[in-house]
Image (cartoon, rainbow, N blue to C red):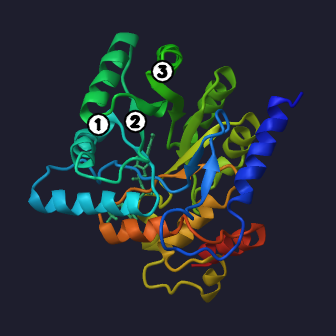
Amino acid sequence: MISRRDMIKTLFAASAALTLPARLSLAGSANAIKRVIPSSGEMLPVMGMGSSRTFDVHLDGATRAQLTEVLRHFFDQGGAVIDSSPMYGAAESVLGELLTGISNRDALFAATKVWTNGKASGIQQMGQSMARMRVDRFDLMQIHNLRDWKIHIKTLKAWKEQDKIRYLGITTSHNRAHDELIRALKAESFDFVQFTYNIANRESEKRLLPLAQDRGIATLINRPFQRSRLFHQVKGVPLPEWAREFDCASWGQFFLKFTLSHPATTCVIPATSKPHHMADNMAAGFGRLPDAAMRKRMIAHVQSL
Ligand SMILES: NC(=O)c1ccc[n+]([C@@H]2O[C@H](COP(=O)([O-])OP(=O)(O)OC[C@H]3O[C@@H](n4cnc5c(N)ncnc54)[C@H](OP(=O)(O)O)[C@@H]3O)[C@@H](O)[C@H]2O)c1
């Protein structure tokens, strides 16, 4: 009988095979790179999107048109995972409202978070998020920044059992929280874990990414641009010519393809308010990804700037 560990290895190998070189046509979403959710075997497109700040807006005419275009590009180019939180002000409501106007949103994989203390407050807040994002159930409910996680995990397990959510997860974006996050991941069975990983912040390579791979936990990677700081670092610097070797045409794709090329990355969730940035980001989910030698070259190059 195949062990859970062997099964996880096989699933990771299968999903890695889907990312292998082959010059893919960038037209259409069918060729979008996908990775497996180890706890179920379901495949997810590697490019998702966040909504912190970018969707926390008042929906006047111009903003509505701009963010609708952002969402349209996302689904046109094969996106599925949208990450939000009650912590992001109006973002859940804005997403809920705009998504009703998007005809090709069938692939939506709706993820939000619980961010409060106490069982009753958590239940109330998750119900409110459902109403705000206008979904009957969330694909993924995550415990935001580990807040009161020992209480919320009990509700999330019960809700998963009752099919009120499909997957459960836990998040941070702080390196200082990794010890506690690792304790949580070892104590409970999470389907997903969300944390920061980018070319300038590689702390999660040490323990979190290997742990997720070993235990078969899908990863959502936040802050792939270290908010916007990575772009400031390369401002005015031309993209190296060798970036073409992994089908990379912009600095945004350079940073995203770095994060995506770690074998334990399941899905990356950059946030943008601009349609042309969304188109740029989604293109990172197609074509070749850097191999181990190329990843080293990328790190050295960025460090030299
Ligand atoms: N603890 C947690 O659970 C936690 C913590 C942090 C983040 N998150 C999640 O992760 C998501 C991503 O993190 P983040 O929003 O903090 O930071 P991020 O995705 O690293 O960076 C977002 C910034 O990058 C800019 N940008 C996006 N695409 C670009 C492109 N192609 N070219 C140039 N600039 C580009 C955006 O500005 P424009 O609008 O101008 O494009 C925005 O200011 C969040 O939205 C949230 O959903 C979760």
The amino acid type of the residue labelled 2 equals: Thr
Is 236 located above or below residue 103 in the figure? below
Q: Which residue is mark 2?
A: 112
- Do callouts 2 and 1 mark residues in contact (Cβ within 8 Å)? yes
Separation (CA) of disc 2 from disc 3: 16 Å
Residue under the point 27% across and 34% down:
134
Q: At which x and y percent is residue 24?
A: 61, 74
Query: Residue 280 in the image: x percent, y percent?
Result: 43, 71
Asked which quadrant contains residue 79, the reply is bottom left
Observer-side mark, 2 or 3, equals 3
Give the left or right position of residue 139, taking residue 7 as reference: left
Give the foreground label among 2 and 1: 1
Query: Marks 2 and 1, Cα distance to the nearest angstrom?
Result: 9 Å
Q: Nearer the viewer, residue 265 or 300?
A: 265
- Residues packed near mark 3 inside 10 Å, few (<14), some (14 to 19) or many (20 plus): few
Camera-nearest residue between 224 and 218: 218
User: Residue 54 vs residue 242: left or right?
Assistant: left
Q: Earlier in the sequence, mark 2 or mark 3?
A: 2
- The amino acid type, in three-letter code, at marker 3 is Asp
Report the residue that reaches farthest toward the left.
61
Q: Which residue is mark 3?
A: 163
Q: Nearer the viewer, mark 3 or mark 1?
A: 3
